[in-house]
Image (tube, grey):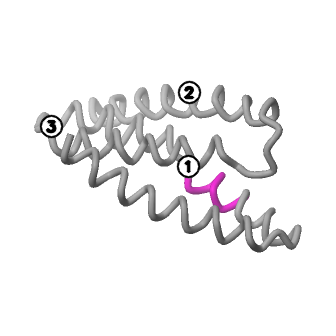
Amino acid sequence: MTNFLLVGFGATVGAFLRNELTLQQSRIKLDFPIVTLLINIFGAIFLGILTAQIHNGAILLLLGTGFCGGFTTYGTFNMELSQLWFQHRLGRCFLYFILTYIFGILGFVVGIHI
């Protein structure tokens, strides 16, 4: 039960923070989902740092599985990617796809080495 609560609390905080940041997307006058991209990159960096530095299972559940899982978002990424595709903005669609995966992987690796 404790693991369930740790993951649930971390995910709640992460999802709340992501939602607050995502609300700022409408204030940015860019035709690109930059907020979700940055959230996923920073989440990957943070998860890399956690993976390399934290060896306590409870803290990893709280911050790694919970917070990072709630903060980063694969679902929103796919929704925004699909919207770009169906709006025939293929260049932006592929750019978003490539940037998300390349910088996600690089962010995780950088986080491990921090």
Sequence-wise first label, 1 or 2 = 2
Which one is in front, 3 or 48? Answer: 48
Which one is in front, 25 or 62? Answer: 25
Q: Position of residue 21 (x, y in %)?
A: 64, 30
Label 1 crowding class (10 Å Cα cut-off): few <14, some 14-19, many 20+? some
Residue placed under numbered mark 3 in the picture? 53
Q: Main secondary structure of the magenta part?
A: helix
Sequence-wise first label, 2 or 3 = 2
Q: Quadrant of the N terminus?
A: top left
Which one is in front, 105 or 76? Answer: 105
Q: Position of residue 84 (x, y in %)?
A: 79, 64
Residue 42 vertical position relative to residue 77 in the rendered view, above or below: above
Label 1 element class: loop
The amino acid sitting under disc 3 is: Gln
Q: What segment is highlighted magenta in the picture?
A: 74-79
Label 3 element class: helix
| 63 on left or right of 37 | left
Q: Position of residue 92 (x, y in %)?
A: 73, 65
Residue placed under numbered mark 2 in the picture? 17
Label 3 crowding class (10 Å Cα cut-off): few <14, some 14-19, many 20+? some
Circles 2 and 3: CB atoms closer than 8 Å: no
Sequence-wise first label, 1 or 3 = 3
| 83 on left or right of 46 | right
- Label 1, label 3: how far apart the Cα atoms are: 23 Å
Residue placed under numbered mark 1 in the picture? 73
Residue 37 vertical position relative to residue 88 in the rendered view, above or below: above
- Foreground mark, 1 or 3, reads 3
- Label 2, label 3: how far apart the Cα atoms are: 23 Å
Outermost residue toward the right?
A: 87
